[in-house]
Amino acid sequence: MNNTVVRNIIRFFIFLLLQGLVLKGIDLSAGEFDYIHIIIYHLFILLLPLNMPRWSILLVALFMGIGVDLFYDSPGVHASACVFTAYLRKPVLQFLEPQGGYNINEVPSLYHFDISWIVIYTSLLTFAHFLWYFSMEAFSFVFIFDIVLNTIFSFIISIIFILIYHFIIRPKY
């Protein structure tokens, strides 16, 4: 088995267990204000290699989402958000493609790209992930105010954690 495959399998389980066992238990609510959730498991999808086929990214995203759904007792909500994020990954990468193109052996990380590219790439997909996730969780636009507040506040706290991960770990593969 290839070194990149082994690293991604390990990363899959690290993010799954980190989200399900650690971050799920952190409660940042203040009375009635319970709109802040730390969600970073989708970073696994964002860090997959650029040369990985789209169908396999969608499949791996589905497995990640199902795994998180098992921890959160939310049948299919995380899975649909992961698949949605994985589906949007390619158009976002095409939108942000540098003038010389990508090296297909790279992963979208600070090791290979500059900070502005990482912030835009991560922010676009994280915001889309949260908007989809909280919309599916509420499953009604009657709760549009709650959907927007959950999306905005969870996005802010999660993007901070994701950028800290990028600065500390700086994944190569």
Image (tube, rainbow, N blue to C red):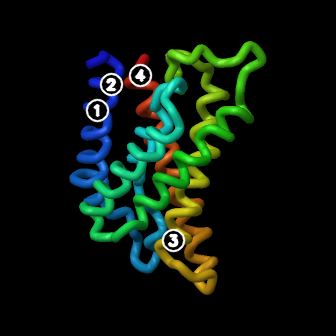
Q: Amino acid at mark 1?
A: Ile
Q: Provide the secondary structure element on which disc 1 rests.
A: helix
Q: CA distance from mark 2 to mark 1?
A: 6 Å
Q: Amino acid at mark 4?
A: Pro
Q: List the residue tagged with mark 1.
A: 9
Q: CB of mark 2 within 8 Å of CB of mark 1? A: yes
Q: List the residue tagged with mark 4.
A: 171
Expressed as whole percent of the image width and height from the top left, the position of residue 67 reads 29, 54
Comparing labels 4 and 1, the label whose residue is closer to the camera: 1
Q: Amino acid at mark 3?
A: Met
In this orientation, does residue 120 appear? no
Expressed as whole percent of the image width and height from the top left, the position of residue 11 reads 31, 33
In this orientation, does residue 32 appear? yes
Q: List the residue tagged with mark 2.
A: 5
Q: Provide the secondary structure element on which disc 3 rests.
A: helix
Q: Amino acid at mark 2?
A: Val
Name the residue: 32% across, 64% down. 27
Q: List the residue tagged with mark 3.
A: 136
Query: Which label's residue is closer to the chain start, 1 or 3?
Result: 1
